[in-house]
Image (spheres, rainbow, N blue to C red):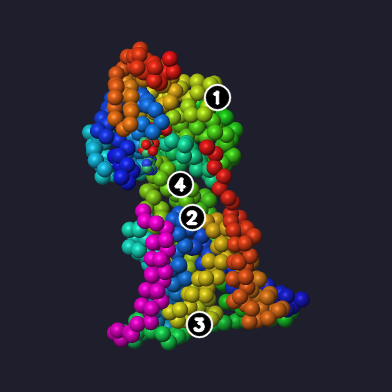
Amino acid sequence: MTEFLQHLVNGLSVGTIYALIALGYTMVYGVLKLINFAHGDVYMVGAFSGYYIAHALGAGDRPTLPKALAVFVGSMVVCGALGAAIERFAYRPLRARPRLTALITAIGVSFLLEYGFQLPSFGLTTQPFPPGPTPRFFPQPFARVSWSLGGVELSNYDVVSFAVAFGFMLLLQLVVYRTRFGRAMRAVSFDAQVAGLMGINVNRVIAGTFVLGSVLASVAALLVAGSRPTINPLMGLMPGLKAFVAAVFGGIGNVPGAMVGGLVLGLAEEYVAGYLLSSYRDAIAFAILIVVLLVRPEGLFGRVRAEKV
Amino acid sequence: MHYGAVEALRGVSLEVPDGQVVALIGANGAGKTTTLRAISRMLRPSGGSVRFRGEGLGRLASHEVVARGLAHAPEGRGIFLNLTVRENLELGAYLRRDRDGIAADLARSFDLFPILRDRQGQVGGTLSGGEQQMLSVARALMSRPRLLLLDEPSLGLAPQVVERIFQVLAEVARGGVSLLLVEQNAHKALQIAHRAYVLETGQVVMQGTGRELLASPEVRKAYLGE
Ligand SMILES: Nc1ncnc2c1ncn2[C@@H]1O[C@H](COP(=O)(O)OP(=O)(O)OP(=O)(O)O)[C@@H](O)[C@H]1O
Ligand SMILES: [Mg+2]
């Protein structure tokens, strides 16, 4: 029983991260019908921007709450701006082109970030940029405190991570279903041309969607880097792929689906690795992808669009 | 106006005077929908110009055209099937900030089409074709347009519903909104139109007052089935 609960804690902790990243895939797919393969790398940039901001503020000193908040907000701003820039300069010029062109461009942007970050550093500052291929250590935002509740290990990092991740998911849900911007976003994702006829500035909504998704990716990255501090320019690859699987599983384009998909995937990984064989951890995501594509390609909450004529 | 290499419109010139109802009729594929899309900037015409209240619309995107007082109820109704009836109506008023005015216009939509009041919480995808058509017209009115483009608002509707829609349109026109009305139902359209144009393979082949065209033998033969 303790083992089961421990896996539950671990699984939810990974799952919320997948969910946060998956939201970015699913929202961008919703408005553009594009899989933004650079999304995992935005997550990576989230971790590194947090790293640089923390160092600029003096990471060696005693961690304080204002500093942690500054790192958080700063990294969200950097990623939001990066998302908007990627949309504006990489995807918008190709909007009218075949979907495949944009998809290949997405892979190009992904490579640009992954390998751009591995270039030799300028060496201008104490923390060289680009960081280069060697892993860096993300400074601890606050001291770790662990508790053992009837044998189940739980740390203050887990608690903060859950609270923050669920908080942001709830917030996003409110934005999408309760605000004017969210309504515009859902309209654009159904029919961008008609959305324009309502007076919706479609370009602005699409850019806003990239900003939202990228901000959530940076939140995910910081939550991960806080407890597993080794970061490197390729760190977005695996979480990016898995979050993509989570988004497909939940029904790509569907916001609640991405959240459920992320949680289910995190739990599935954890239980398979815990009870069967730990080396299957990474395979489970792709097994799920294959099964979903075979059995229910529209995903858990996706629907086949039926239109009245 | 071209679709790729296809020339869909050639030298079409029409005018909608302030506060008037103008009908645009023509056979399938004549270019009626294309004309409306070029006006509301859903499409970028390869040539020509659109002037609205003294301003060229040539460089604008469609959302900017809406801001200037033009609404377009598009062919195929354009209902957001994933949003509720109420959300669809609220999107019609997307650019407006006057909460009270919006609430009043929402109530007016429900008075015009009472069925929409009962359906307000349902998503668009669950509406019947006729209900979607009413929603499309009501939604276009939510922006308080000065000019309303309507693409076959009576398509596929039962006679009483057609009657109802034309009643509403006549009422709207009396309220000072100009209408550019594309219709297969030429008889009804010409009856309420001050002016009308007949489009054939991308060109205006005839124009006149609604009454003149109703009386014209060619129109009676080609479009009124006599
Ligand atoms: N997206 C498109 N690509 C290529 N050709 C098109 C496109 N849309 C319309 N056309 C062509 O342009 C011409 C005019 O079409 P349009 O839709 O304006 O006709 P319409 O008068 O509205 O017809 P209907 O009464 O059937 O709605 C037609 O020959 C049509 O085939
Ligand atoms: Mg048409």
A117 in the magenta segment: yes
| Callout 2 amino acid | Gly
Q: Name the residue under label 3.
A: A229
Q: Give the mark, 3 or 2, whose residue is nearer the N terminus.
A: 2
Marks 4 and 2: CB-CB under 8 Å? no
Helix, strand or loop at label 2? It is helix
Q: Give the mark, 4 or 2, whose residue is nearer the N terminus.
A: 2
Q: Which of marks 3 and 1 is in front?
A: 1
Point out residue A147 in the picture as x, y percentages from the top left corner.
66, 80
Point out residue A113 in the picture as x, y percentages from the top left corner.
39, 74
Magenta stretch in the rendered image: A96-124
Q: For marks 4 and 2, give the CA distance.
A: 10 Å
The residue marked by circle 4 belongs to what chain? A
Q: Give the mark, 3 or 4, whose residue is nearer the N terminus.
A: 4
Q: Are marks 3 and 1 on the same chain?
A: no
Neighbour class for label 2 at 10 Å: few (<14), some, many (≥20)? many
Give the label on residue B8, or none. none
Q: For marks 1 and 2, give the CA distance.
A: 35 Å
Q: Mark 4 points at which residue?
A: A191
Neighbour class for label 1 at 10 Å: few (<14), some, many (≥20)? few
Helix, strand or loop at label 1? It is loop
Residue at 29 percent across and 27 percent down: it is B204
Give the total of numbered labels: 4
Query: Is residue A199 in sight in this rendering?
Result: no
Q: Quadrant of residue A161?
A: bottom right
Q: For marks 3 and 4, give the CA distance.
A: 42 Å
| Callout 1 amino acid | Ala
